[in-house]
Structures are given as structure tokens and as C-alpha cells.
């Protein structure tokens, strides 16, 4: 095989490989796993009967702020209740599931009125200083439009 | 009694209990529901009111395709009745040892159910939180019509009425076909 032929074969191989990669990336259901953006599921514990407002959180800026808040949060060893989520009607906190295990964020936690409860085997209570985590997650819920207008009006009235 | 008649009677009884079960009134025993996990977060007031764990956050009418819209007493009542929940008869007593349950609505927003225990007191499970026998003022609930039903931006002002549910004394094992 001449030098020219070898180069041509190599170039064709490269082109075919590139086309194959693009094909699997662009074609849904191609059967090849496509790298998915890591995300968390955020559920605003609000309703008694209806499904709660829920959204996916993947925004790197918000995730970075969350990580920062967790890094600086103080452990509360004397938290007196079994759970931060109150047994009451209406708003009762925010539940976050982190199935993709985004680093620096617990696998599952709840936050309500200044306290974070890390759930599961790592169970512990942390201070949510200035309610920063709760506000961040609630603001994101509002900006994503998952909270009904009627609830937003009531929230504004109480603030 | 002839053997044939006896067998027929036995089959009828088996079929009856197999379909409807034997209704019993469940005690207030919140530990089953308050597991801080699958049961607590996936069963709501409709599950708790009917004492039936489905892990689906059951909705009135979902099984029968009559989802209440808009959110108002009449629509939730119709949806629940389509699931087989019976309105309380004029006597004020649920027949066949069925459990008395109560429905309230925050108009346009949400609904909520309470259930009566054998001790004459009421309890409820507000969505994904824990089951409790206290109202929004932290008072035991002797009457859901007068209980405080407002907190955290929700206010279930409309009392829709009482209903009867075929429940069980085992927590989570109610016999109504909700989903």
C-alpha cells in the first residue's frame, strides 16, 4: 500500500468515527448512553392533597451557591425535634434529592426555617444561616414558575 | 344443610370478603406513616384518610379519570365518589363499620382529608409530612369543622362534608380502591 493510500484510509476512518459519534449524540433513542447534566430534584412541601410543586435543579451557579452554604453551615448537635419538617398543613419546607450525587451536596436533605436536616445514614442537623439555602431554593421555584399565582400572592402578603 | 348449598354459601362469603373486605376503624397510630421516607413522602391526606398506602400520592378520581378541576368542594366530592367513597347517610352514622372521613378545600388551590379514630378524635396527614392528631393551633381535633385549618399560605376554608370509607384496623390496609 502506498503512502497516499494509507493517508486516505486513515482520513476516511477518522471521518467515519466522527460521523458515528455525532450520530449517537444527536439521535434520540440510539441506545447509546449520552452524558446527562447532573441535577437535583427539589420539592416544595406545600400541599396536603395535590402533588407538590417540584423542579429539577442543574444550574451550576445555584449549585455552587448551595455548596458554599453547606461548606459554611454549623452542625446543630442539640436540635430537639425528630425532623425539621413540621406536621402541619400548608408550607412545611423544601425536600431535595440528589440522585446524581453532585459533590458537596447531601444525597437527601430537607430545609425549613433556619435548619437543614441531612437525611439517611448521614443524618444530622445543620444551621441554615439567614435561611440562605431555603431562600435560594424557593426563589428558584418562583423563577421556574412552579408556584401558583394564588400562593405567590399569599406569600407576598405575609412577607 | 346440603353440602352443595354450604359450598355455595361459602363461595359467596369468600367472594364478598375478597371484594369488599371487612371494614374496621383504624386507630391513630402515626408511626407507620411517619417513617421519614417512602411511606411519609409518597402518601398524602387522601391515602391517610382512607388508611390506604399506595405510594402514589393518591388523587380523588385518578383511578376513574375524574380529576377535580377546578379545585372546589363539588368537584372533589364527585371525584371521590367516583372512586367508591360514599357520602355520609342522613343518619350521620357510617354503615357496616365504615370509617367516617371529612373533606375540606382551599378553593382553587388544594383539598384535605381528616379521618375519625375509634376514640372519637380526628387525625390527618398533610401531604408529605407526618400524620398528626393536632390542628394548625396545635389543638387535638374533636371536630374538623371547627379545627384551625389555616397555616403556611394554605387555608382550607370550605368544609365539604363527611364521607364513609371501608378501612381496616391495620395501618395502610384500607379497602377503598384509590390510586
Image (spheres, coloured by chain):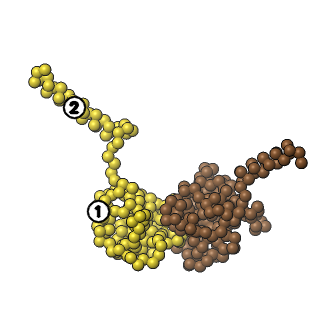
Chain colours: A yellow, B brown
Residue ranking furthest to the right: B1
Q: Which residue is mark 2?
A: A15
User: Mark 1 or 2 closer to N-term?
Assistant: 2
Return the chain for callout 1. Answer: A
Residue ranking furthest to the front: B3
User: Is A69 situated left or right of B57 in this image?
Assistant: left
Above or below, A144 against B5 in this view is: below
| x and y, in percent, of residue A151 in the image | 48, 67
| x and y, in percent, of residue B74 in the image | 65, 60
Which residue is rendered at x = 39% and y = 70% of the image? A124
SS type, badge 1: helix
| x and y, in percent, of residue A77 in the image | 38, 76
Q: Quadrant of the C terminus of chain A?
A: bottom left
SS type, badge 2: helix
Marks 1 and 2, how far apart in space?
Answer: 39 Å
Q: Which image quarter: residue B59?
A: bottom right
The answer to whether any part of residue A99 appears in the image is: yes
Q: Which residue is mark 1?
A: A64
Q: Quadrant of the N terminus of chain A?
A: top left
User: Is B167 situated left or right of A37 in this image?
Assistant: right
| x and y, in percent, of residue A153 in the image | 46, 69
Return the chain for callout 2. Answer: A
Amino acid at each position: 500500500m502506498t503512502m497516499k493510500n494509507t493517508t486516505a484510509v486513515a482520513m476516511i476512518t477518522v471521518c467515519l468515527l466522527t460521523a458515528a459519534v455525532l450520530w449517537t449524540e444527536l439521535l434520540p433513542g440510539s441506545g447509546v448512553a449520552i452524558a446527562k447534566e447532573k441535577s437535583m430534584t427539589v420539592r416544595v412541601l406545600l400541599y396536603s392533597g395535590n402533588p407538590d410543586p417540584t423542579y429539577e435543579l442543574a444550574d451550576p451557579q445555584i449549585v455552587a451557591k448551595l455548596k458554599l452554604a453547606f461548606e459554611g453551615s454549623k452542625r446543630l448537635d442539640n436540635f430537639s425535634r425528630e425532623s425539621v419538617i413540621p406536621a402541619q398543613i400548608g408550607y412545611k419546607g423544601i425536600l431535595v434529592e440528589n440522585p446524581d450525587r453532585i459533590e458537596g451536596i447531601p444525597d437527601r436533605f430537607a430545609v425549613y426555617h433556619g435548619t437543614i436536616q441531612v437525611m439517611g445514614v448521614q443524618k444530622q442537623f445543620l444551621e441554615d444561616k439567614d435561611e440562605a439555602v431555603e431562600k435560594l431554593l424557593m426563589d428558584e421555584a418562583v423563577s421556574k414558575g412552579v408556584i401558583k399565582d394564588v400562593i405567590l400572592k399569599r406569600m407576598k402578603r405575609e412577607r | 344443610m346440603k353440602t352443595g348449598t354450604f359450598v355455595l354459601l361459602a363461595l359467596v362469603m369468600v367472594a364478598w370478603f375478597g371484594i369488599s373486605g371487612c371494614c374496621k376503624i383504624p386507630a391513630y397510630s402515626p408511626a407507620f406513616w411517619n417513617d421519614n421516607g417512602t411511606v411519609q413522602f409518597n402518601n398524602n391526606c387522601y391515602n391517610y384518610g382512607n388508611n390506604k398506602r399506595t405510594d402514589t400520592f393518591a388523587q380523588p378520581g385518578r383511578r376513574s379519570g375524574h380529576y377535580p378541576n377546578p379545585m372546589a368542594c363539588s368537584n372533589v366530592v364527585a371525584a371521590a365518589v367516583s372512586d367508591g367513597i360514599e357520602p355520609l347517610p342522613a343518619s350521620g352514622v357510617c354503615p357496616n363499620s365504615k370509617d367516617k372521613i371529612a373533606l375540606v378545600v382551599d378553593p382553587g388551590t388544594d383539598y384535605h382529608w381528616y379521618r375519625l379514630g375509634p376514640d372519637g378524635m380526628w387525625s390527618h396527614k398533610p401531604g408529605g409530612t407526618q400524620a398528626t392528631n393536632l390542628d394548625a393551633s396545635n389543638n387535638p381535633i374533636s371536630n374538623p369543622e371547627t379545627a384551625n385549618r389555616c397555616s403556611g399560605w394554605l387555608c382550607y376554608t370550605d368544609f365539604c362534608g363527611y364521607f364513609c370509607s371501608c378501612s381496616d384496623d391495620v395501618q395502610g390496609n384500607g379497602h377503598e380502591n384509590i390510586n
